[in-house]
Image: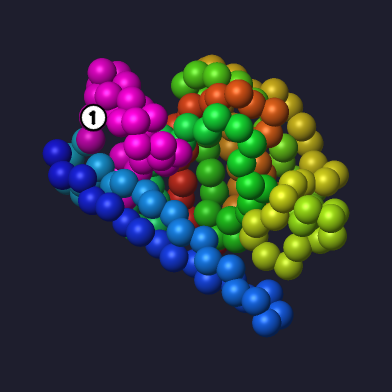
Amino acid sequence: MRTYTFIGIVIVAFGVGVSTLTAQIVIQQQAPTDAAADFPLAAINAIIQEMDDAGRSTTRLLEGGAYNVNIRRIGNAETALMHPRTTDVYVVKDGSGTLVTGGHIVDERGNPVDGTRGARIVGGVERVIGAGDLVFIPAGVPHGIRDTSGITWFNIRFDTK
């Protein structure tokens, strides 16, 4: 199995200042177009152990261009975010946390953000999710997980807009 590393650099301008966010996603394989792709539980558990060892929160199991399948693993709250074109499906493997969806993304001071990421969500729907839960998050809906000491989920993403 081939492993690819994708390093993305996003530059966001704030007036005269510039902030750089670097994210690393390891890609296990390109999505096949002529056969099924299998990931046995033992392989998934080995990937999760590699993620823990490397301090990585995301591994892309399959990259298909307009869609991808990921393992996500966080040990504390994540940034509130929104994908304008991409729908997410979460299937929780283990752990739990409070998922917030809908509402509005705000910065650390509670001011609305003009973008796709912020400190938190206000006015959203909160619910605790845990092992076995499945969540569908349409494109354009703010979302984020908070109040967790650890949660692992499969994140199936596809462009719908």
Residue 6 occupies which quadrant of the picture?
bottom left
| Residue 133 screen position, x and y as percent | 57, 22
| Residue 150 screen position, x and y as percent | 55, 24
Q: Amino acid at mark 1?
A: Asp
Rendered residue at 49%/27% (across/down): 152
Depicted 94 relative to depicted 73: above or below: above
Describe residue 103's horizontal placement relative to residue 143 as left or right. right
Nearest the viewer among 95 and 65 is: 95
Badge 1 marks a residue whose secondary structure is loop
Report if residue 108 is visible in the image. Answer: yes
* Quadrant (top left, top right, bottom left, bottom right) of the N terminus: top left
How packed mark 1 is, by other alpha carbons closer than 10 Å (few <14, some 14-19, many 20 or more), is few
Instruction: Please count the marks in the image.
Output: 1
* Quadrant (top left, top right, bottom left, bottom right) of the C terminus: bottom right
Q: Which residues are magenta?
A: 37-63
Residue 15 occupies which quadrant of the picture?
bottom right
The reply to whether the magenta stretch includes residue 44 is yes
Nearest the viewer among 61 and 95 is: 95
Depicted 76 relative to depicted 27: above or below: above
Q: Which residue is mark 1?
A: 38
